[in-house]
Amino acid sequence: MTATSPRLPRVRASELQGRGWLNTGDRTLALEDFRGRLLVLDFWTFCCINCLHVLDELREVEERFRDVLVVVGVHSPKFVHEADPVALAAAVERYEVHHPVLDDPELVTWSAYTARAWPTLVVIDPEGYVVAQMAGEGHRHNLEVLLADLVAEHDAKGTLHRGDGPYVPPAPTAGTLRFPAKAVPLPGGSLLVADAGHHALTEVAADGSTLLRRIGSGERGLLDGGPDEARFSEPNGLALVPDHMREALGYDVLVADTVNHALRGVRLADGRVTTVAGTGEQLMVGAADNVRGGGTGAGYDGPARDVRLSSPWDVVWSDALGAFVVAMAGNHTLWTFDGTRLRHVAGTMNEGLLDGPGADAWLAQPSGLSVGPDGRVWVADSETSALRWLDPADGTLHTAVGEGLFDFGHRDGRADQARMQHPLGVAALPDGSVLVADTYNGAVRRYVPPPTGEPAGAGEVTTVARDLAEPSGLVVLAGAGAGDGALDVLVVESAAHRVTRVALPAGAGQVVDGGAHRTQRPVTDLAPGEVLLDVVFTPAAGQKYDDRYGPSTRLQVSSTPPGLLLDGSGDDVPLTRTLRLDPTVGEGVLHVTAHAASCDADPAVEYPACHLNAQDWGVPVRVVEGAPATLTLPLHG
């Protein structure tokens, strides 16, 4: 039997309130301004890779329904830096957000719509009623089905108005670089920059600003070919191919082409670009068709062109592993690529901070990589604001700095007490210390490991440069760090559209204590004892649960601190579960991950299209006598 999406009770949409609006030509909008149009609210924050995936999903939806639909991004920040209106304006431009954006730094509208996760979509009909709420990514098809039904319904009622929306594009910025991400020095002394905002690679002279050439047409897309016709989509990481492999592989630079979910090879002699890994489609956690021939992608070890990738953010060569290491930010994993095969080496695809064997470890948007003199692969794990490393000898993952998904700040000192804020870049130095591009603190930090035998947390963190504009990549110039002298480092200042040469001080640097923070979100009060967790998912109209390859749903639950949950943690199939909370613990965060697969239900179609919806929630909770004994999380409903 085909399931249909039930309509929620007719609830009036709440007013849109915040600090201000972007992409409206300085016009303040109200809910009444959208009457007669379909309205989708996209609750997002610009640090969140899942939110960036949804922005890409929405581009196609906006184009299909452009005369009847308005998307409004409600920016609800996680990090302190994201609450800066200048940083938000830059992010809206960087990610090519072509719809109005409400700046909601106090989470007023977030709370009014009871959003609990980044991203969350809320659909409002032309009469101003909420008709659906969807958390996570992968909802494009379900959203299109619902919008088509609403168009038909309100066309018939005469309540649908067609025309242009309130979007007003901002004035474009011009320059040699536009939101550059990372860079690598080339043998001749020039610099190759991943010019993400131009969807290209830009070669500049040693001064970091003189344009030598561009590789890529500058149009967003996935197309191989020469430098004038090839297309990228927000490339980020770059790595030089070792000399002994260049002739066999046929390219000199490996590129993490992030939004294309692909690795690309670039031949420097003529600028030719070739796709060498990935299918160009995003790997969806738990989907059965991530691998050609069937498979989820977890534990994959096979041909590089046969598996979907998910927002590869950086790449680096490891002699110890005999392969490139790939930071797969989109599904919180590390992979290796030897030129022909890809192998999943670390990360369960759950988002968080958990050390141990690679197969069991958790990461959170790994976004920067560097190999140290001892072979360690250093990782800037952005969403946990952490510096971590992979031991190539045994594949274990370790943490040097960082506490978890919701702990951040700018605090130097002993490593286990230090805090960073969404770092995106890392550079290991010959003396064993590590530089970190601490992006949202606008700083370069230095981690000095402890003496042999001491735990990593006994190392020291200092600040060696400040007042930078979202540094996202570091290039340590040849010979730096060999002695006690100052370091010359090229810093890719993404938000300033430039590469800056910075002379870092000799020794450790200064000690800064700008405080430690926790992400502040509305807390949900729950009753002590048994609580029913209900993740709501109903397949869209014309779809049914997809159980051809096993159970179509999955629910994982854990807590911080672990003692908050007396019962109910773990991994199981049903989307409902009874939890038991410990009133003596009092408060914490429930971590919930849900997957649900559905497919088109037309019996005449032998191989129906299938769709996977997935979301991670981190719900701050407080145990209070007399509070509700049910926690409802809408995945799609």
Image: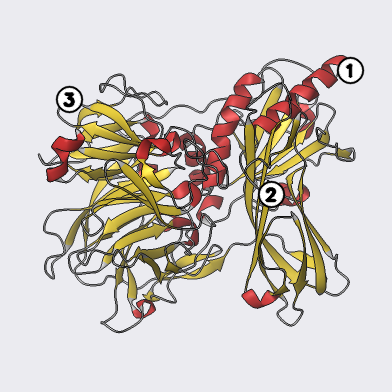
Mark 1 or 3: the one toward you: 3
Q: Residues within 10 Å of mark 2 (few under 14, many from 20)?
A: many
Find residue 226 and name its label.
none
The colouring scheme, among rainbow, by chain, secondary structure or one colour, is secondary structure
The residue under label 1 is 157
Q: Look at the image and tell me in which quarter the C terminus lies.
A: top right
Q: Residue at x 66, y 17 (%)?
A: 164
Image x and y of residue 626, in percent: 88, 71
Tag 2: amino acid: Thr
Estimate the spatial distance between the alpha carbons at disc 1 and disc 2, rounded to whole Å.
Answer: 37 Å
Q: With 286 as the anchor, is 224 left or right in this view? A: left
- Asked where in the image residue 254 lies, by quadrant, the reply is top left
Estimate the spatial distance between the alpha carbons at disc 1 and disc 3, rounded to whole Å.
Answer: 59 Å
Image x and y of residue 347, in percent: 46, 58
Mark 3 or 2: the one toward you: 2
Q: With 525 as the anchor, is 485 left or right in this view? A: left
Q: Nearer the viewer, residue 600 or 53?
A: 600
Whether 258 is drawn above or below 118: the answer is above
